[in-house]
Every structure is written in C-alpha cells, then in structure tokens.
Image (cartoon, rainbow, N blue to C red):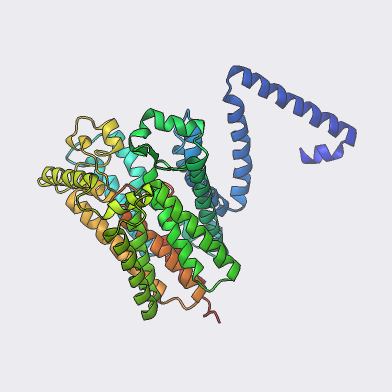
Amino acid sequence: MIRFLSSLSQTWRTVIFSVFGLLISLVVSLLTFASPIAPMILIVGALMVIFIIFLFKDPSIGLTALTVYCFIFGIFAREIGGIPYGIGIEVFLLLIWIAVIILNQQFNWKSLNNNLTKLMLIWFIISFVEIINPAGASVRGWLQEIRSTGLFPILIIPLVFLLYNSKKKLDLFLIVILSLSFLATLNGLKQQFIGLSPGEQRFLTEGGEITHVLWGVLRVFSFYSDAGQFGASQASFTLMAIVLAVGPFQWWKRLILLIAAGLFFYGMLISGTRGALFALIVGAFFAIFLTKNIKVLFAGLTVALLFLAFLKFTYIGNGSYQIYRLRTALDPKEASLNVRINNQKIIGQYLASRPFGGGLGVIGTWGKEYNKDKYLSTVEPDSYWVKIWAMYGIVGFTIWFCMIMYIFGQCCGIIWNIRNEGLRYKMIAMMSTCAGIFFCSYGNEVMNAMPSSLVVSVCLAFIFLSPNFDDKPET
C-alpha cells in the first residue's frame, strides 16, 4: 500500500486522502446520528490501534500506560459511565502479556526466579483454590474478588522484572506516579474550593453523600473511588516525596519534592481519612529505620512522637475541621472505631468454627451483590486485614500476613546492602510507601484497590530488582 501511494503523483495522493477523509467524516456523522457514544468508541478504537503498534515495539510502554490508567479510570467511570471501566485493567494486562509472549526472546525470563514472584504465585494458587471453599460462596463473587486479591499482583509483578529492568524505568515510574498524585491533589483542591463536576456531584447524590459529606463538610475524594483511597494515597506519597527530598539529589528537585509533599499532606487532610495518619506514621518509622543512622533515627522518632502528642494531648487547630477529624484517629472512644471493633467481634465469633473463612467475595461490595444469602455479607469489614480474615479464615490470614512480613523483611535487607546512596533513598521511599499502605489497610480497604495495589506491586518488584542497578557508591 505504501509503495502504491508513493508511486502516485502528488495530485492523486491529495485526491485519495481527501476522499478517505470525507468517508471517515461521513461514517462519524452516521454513527453520531445512530448513537451519541459511537464516535467516542471510534476514537478510542483508533487510539488503541496506535497504542498496540507502539506496544509491540516496546512493551514497557504498556506498563506505563497501565499505571496512568489505574490512577485516572475513575474519571471515566464518573463523567462518562456506561461500562465497567475497571475491566480496562485486564485489557491492558492482556495486551501487554500478549506482546511479551510474542517478543519473548527479548526478555530475561530468569529474572522471574525470585521470592517475590514465587510468593505471589503461591498466594494466587491459594486464592484460586478458594473457589471450592466449603462455605459455598458464589462463584461470581469469587471471580470479582480474585481480580484484586490474587490476579493483579501475579500479572503485574513479573512484568516489572521483565520490562522495568533499568534505572531509567525506575526514574520514569517515580516521575509518573508522583505527577499523577499531584494531579489528584489539584483535582481535590478544585473540589474543595471551586466545586464538583457533574459526575462527582452525581456520585454524592447516588449515595456517596452519606460517607463523604459530614457535618456539611466535604470529604474530598478527587478522581479516586472514595475519600479513604484518596487520603491513604496522599499520605503515602507525602512520605515518598519527603524521603526523596532529603536524598542526594539536585537542590531544585528536592525543592519541588518538598512543595509536592506539602500539597500531598494537605490533600490527606481534606480527605478526612483518619486512617491515613497511620500510613504516614508507620511509613515514617520504616523510612527512619532503613536509614541506619542513629542521629536521624533519634531525631525522627522525636518529631513523630511530638506530632502524635500534639494531636493526642492538645486542642490546637480544632477550629479546622480537617485537623479535628485527624485528631479523632487517636481517640479510643471514637464512635466509628467502636463500631469496627464490634464488627470484628461478630466476625470472630462466626469464623470460630470456620478456619478457612467464608470464601472470596463473601464480604464487602461483592458480598452484598452476589452473596446476599451469606451472613458475612451483612457485616462491614471496614478493613482489608479483616476482609482477608473473613474470606480466607485464620489459616489464610496467617499465611498472608507472614508472607507480607517476609517480603518486607527481605526488602529491608536488600535496601541495607545498596551502596549507591541515591538508589538507596529511592528504595527507602518505595519501601516506606508500601509499609504505610499496608498498615493503613488495617483501617480501610486500601492495598486491594487501584492505584494503591499497583503502586505496592511495582514498588516491591523494584526493590527486588534494585541490586541490579547498584553499580557503585555515589561520591
């Protein structure tokens, strides 16, 4: 075709392209008449063709595109609607894996022989076997739940080892996620000071107002699924930006990171997510611990304890609803905390005779939709840890918790052995972010939802990869 077109004169090429353009315009017009959404489908289809062309040239482009999509697909769901945009994650993963398999000779498959990939595979197998859980949960609920619980990690983590195996890809990933988090902050500020978009307002009207407008004050959620996700994400990125800002980087980069950290922290406050405080505190302890510097450790612990004492024992700043709500996270008499503790007691009594839990999808959103006949579907988990316990039982929860602790322990060992100072600070930032998200998940469902799930998976994989980037100490 290209040879044929190049053999034609300029006049004929102009005529052919003009006719082709008119035909496309006619098709778009007819589609618009038939359905308002049809032209959008045509445009998306054209973009997908372009994306696939680039994907088969460099599959790592697909992983970067997936990262962006996991942050922003909530915008499409709220503002456009019509289809379950979460399925787009599987579409991206399927296309990336097809490209990787076709171009298999370009990749170092031996890099998948590591403990992180093996443990994720074991957890996926356990999750898969849950389909025959004696409790008899719905297969449809299992199918929905296994996506975030077992499928996404085992599909994403190996891709990092295969496609993101360079320092440039590490830096690119950090820039992308920090930039997207910054955009989320800006959108949150827009919600707070300018107002909501039609889709955001519809989200509140259709039920979100119950949990997102308290005492007339909006809990900002940006383009995340809810304020809990937004707040936890902002807290973890606050920590990431601070750790990178004290690293051995150029002064202007450190300044930008400090400004970003301040904005992320404000985003955390306006989300009204009390559990995000623990993402910040626990992540900070991890960051300080990983420095192996006694002076930094002492100073960091002092600052953290003073901050907690400020929240616990003073009333300074209570005029600000955001600070007041954050302060209630440390109140043992807080009403919602007692409700959660009550729910955990109820679940504990039910699971006393069920060591393998109630099965995947039996509790939470999918429990209400597909397992209405099951008792656990009537109890709110209010925590990813509790959700794992309810679905997998004490046996599954123990395996999961020990697995995460082992991974974190190995990550700490890897980071301590890194000689390159700049690389070590990047890994500390990633590790503290993962730790913050994990412990924040005790109070909310965070690490099983996008984009936090992807961030944790990719960050852990990069830490396991980091010895390959550790060339020499920086001077």
Q: So how many labels did they put on this image?
A: 0
Q: Nearer the viewer, residue 208 or 357?
A: 208
- Residue 465 visible from this viewpoint: no
Q: Picture quarter containing residue 279?
A: bottom left
- Residue 4 in percent (x, y) is at 81, 37
- Residue 57 in percent (x, y) is at 62, 52
- Residue 292 in percent (x, y) is at 38, 78
- Residue 254 visible from this viewpoint: yes
Q: Picture quarter containing residue 221?
A: top left
Q: Nearer the viewer, residue 55 or 31?
A: 31
Name, please, the residue furthest toward the top: 33
Q: Picture quarter containing residue 31?
A: top right
- Residue 32 in percent (x, y) is at 62, 21
Name, please, the residue furthest toward the bottom: 475
Q: Is residue 423 left or right of residue 374?
A: right
Q: Is residue 233 left or right of residue 143?
A: right
- Residue in the picture at 67% in, 21% down: 29
Q: Is residue 435 left or right of residue 386?
A: right
Quadrant location of the N terminus in the rendered image: top right
Q: In the image, is residue 292 above or below residue 432?
A: below
Quadrant location of the C terminus in the rendered image: bottom right
Q: Nearer the viewer, residue 330 or 88?
A: 330
Q: Nearer the viewer, residue 51 or 293?
A: 293
- Residue in the picture at 45% in, 76% down: 418
- Residue in the picture at 23% in, 57% down: 399
